[in-house]
Image (cartoon, grey):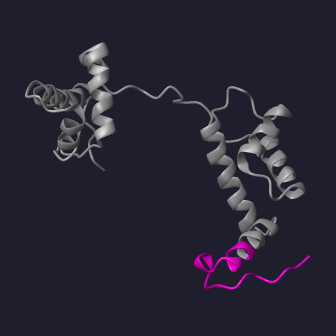
Amino acid sequence: MQDHPSSTELALGRHAAVSWIQQALEQNCTLARALALASERNWGGKLYAPSTIEAWYYAHRAQGFEALKRRTRKDKGSRKALNAEACEAIAKLRREYPQLKVPVLIRQLGDQGVLSSATHAEFVEARIECHLLLLRKVGAPEIVVRASAQHNAEDPRLASPVPPRPLTH
């Protein structure tokens, strides 16, 4: 297991990248070019995306060195699993409406009061996608799988080498 650098060590590595960007800008390099070049360099033994380095650059400009330190996650220690009521509601809606898309499913569960408005949509969507995948694996609604297989059969570019499973009711 690798040792994680301290918050200050991490901030120093990020500061090195920010300083490098500032020097490139002083030499009349555009920010986009400076970020692209900086993303090809090692910072603390790692390569970072231009967008990451750009975020460091603007954070440093706005809040100084402290902004470059590691912060604990705001959701640290909070519960990440869906409760049993939400899982049952997902399964029920999926059985009743197998074609229902995940964003609509989230909205329905919110309207029913199963998911609180404080729940982050991206997190909920990822959890529901996993739950739906599990439902498909254990033999719950086959209609979604069959519908996509029929659609793939209509478009030869999307044709699967594996034939669709026979319909069973």
x, y percent for residue 31? 22, 31
Who's the residue at 7% across and 28% down the image?
A: 27
Position of 87 relative to 62 (above/below): below
Query: From the viewer's perspective, is 49 left or right of 80?
Result: left
To which quarter of the image does residue 24 belong?
Answer: top left
Q: What residue occupies the far left of the structure in this picture?
A: 27
Q: Residue at x 51, y 30 (%)?
A: 76
The foreground one among 108 and 157 is: 157
Q: Where is residue 6 in the image (x, y as percent from the top left)?
A: 25, 30
| Magenta residues (range) | 150-169
**Residue 124 x %, y %:** 66, 41
Point 63% across, 33% down: residue: 120
Q: Which sits in the foreground, 52 or 127? A: 52
Examine the image and state in which quarter residue 117 appears: top right
Q: In the shown orientation, is residue 35 left or right of residue 73?
A: left
Q: How many marks?
A: 0
Residue in the picture at 70% in, 61% down:
134
Rendered view: 145 above or below 47? below
Q: Within the image, what quadrant is residue 144 found in?
A: bottom right
Q: Nearer the viewer, residue 92 or 103?
A: 103
Quadrant (top left, top right, bottom left, bottom right) of the C terminus: bottom right
Q: Residue farthest to the top?
A: 63
167 in magenta? yes
User: Is the magenta region chiefly helix, strand or loop?
Assistant: loop
Up/down of 89 relative to 18, above or below = below
- Whether residue 67 is in magenta: the answer is no
Across and down, in percent, residue 96 comes to: 90, 55
Q: Is residue 20 left or right of residue 74?
A: left
